[in-house]
Every structure is written in C-alpha cells, then in structure tokens.
Amino acid sequence: MMLKMTNKKLIIFDMDGTLVNSSITIANAINYVRKHLGFEPMDAEHILRLVNDHSINPAETFYHAKAFDKDHEKWFSEYYTKNHEHELVLYNGIKALLLSLKEKGYVIAVATNAYRKSTLESLLHLEVLELFSGIACYDDVLQGKPHPDMLFKLLDEVGFTEDEAIFIGDGPRDEMAAKEAKMDYLMVDWGFTDHNDAVRTVDALKVLLLGDEVV
C-alpha cells in the first residue's frame, strides 16, 4: 500500500473503531436508549455489525424512528457519561501515533458520527483531547457520514484544502465521506468491520504516515 504524504498537512481520524475501542459502550448505549423507548435489547454483535452499514437508517434500525431526536441523544450521552471511564480504551499504540504525528508537525482532527458531548467526554477521559485541532461531530453538521459535511467543516476550520488532508476510518461510511470530499482515504481493520484491502495494525499505519521504514 503506497501513500504520498509529501503535501499532507491535516490528518483526520474517525473515532469509534479507529482511535477508540468503544464497541461495548456503543452497544450498551444503544440498548440503554432502546430500554427507555420500551424495546427489547439487541444482541451486541448484531449492533456492531450494523453500526457501519451505510445502507441502513440507524435511527430506524435501532430506535424505530425516522431520525434521531433529542431524547435519543440525551439517553445515549447519559450512558456515555456514566460508563466511559470503565468501558472506553484507546487501541494499543494510538496515543503514541498521535504524539508522533504532532511532533512531525501534522495537524490532527476527528470526524465522528458520535454526539459532541460524548465525544468530548471520551477524548478527555482518554487524555488525548488536547491533541486535536478540530473535532466535528454528528450534531455539528446537517448530515453525518457518509455525507462529507464534517470533513468540509474541518477543512474550513483549520484552513487546508482537501488535497492537503487525509481521512482515516474503519468503515464504508468513512470511505464514502472521503470520496465525496475528494479526499485521500485509508481504511483500517482493527475496529468493528472486516475489509480485504486495509491497514491491519497501528504500527503499519504509523509506517504509512511517517515513513519510518518500508512496508
């Protein structure tokens, strides 16, 4: 896998499944909302298979609603607030990678379909919040991924063009958003989904981004 980083200045990361192993929290938070709505819990593995499925309407699939509403956000964030400290972890090597990118002069940002409140709480708890120059969340834009809105928002905030940026994610929603934004994309495969053509380890991603050795 070849990647030209010579003109890149901004590296945007997806959060869940890319930076943060939040699989337990996401499944539990969705079931927490379902409980408040009077629905039976869904199997956690089934939830995680659906999280990155771009062909579904997640509000309809999980909550039998046409779109997410304020109660969904409130209950989801409530679960995050109560449980992130003992359920969320960074994938091994991620913090070291982020620090290395900063040391090399790259600007780093996050584009996530999570809500802003839970995103900020998660990144603060994981002690990486201050490393990011921009954070775009589901409730910051008109349309979340697979639409490119949050990528455009970040480009505008930090003052770079799509040619100067790369987006790193773990699912088709991320890939589609990057394609629509005409931005280079890298798929990683240590999160919630399986891909044939993807970066398999954080160490391999570091090599691609920083060129420490030949893969």
Image (cartoon, rainbow, N blue to C red):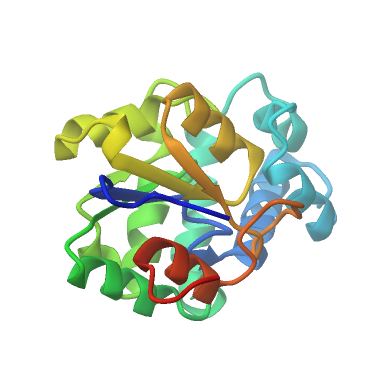
- Identified at 37% across, 73% down, the residue is 97
Q: Nearer the viewer, residue 156 or 46?
A: 156
Relative side of 203 to 128, left or right: right
Image quadrant holding the N terminus, namely: bottom right
Residue 75 placement (x, y as % from top left): 53, 48
Image quadrant holding the C terminus, namely: bottom right
Q: Nearer the viewer, residue 126 or 194?
A: 194
Q: Is residue 145 above or below residue 2?
A: above
Q: Nearer the viewer, residue 58 or 90?
A: 90
- Identified at 23% across, 65% down, the residue is 131
- Identified at 70% across, 51% down, the residue is 197
- Identified at 61% across, 61% down, the residue is 199
Q: Residue furthest front?
A: 214
Residue 173 placement (x, y as % from top left): 60, 35
Whether residue 199 is visible to the viewer of this picture, yes or no, is yes
Q: Nearer the viewer, residue 55 or 9?
A: 9
Residue 39 placement (x, y as % from top left): 79, 42
Relative side of 198 to 143, left or right: right
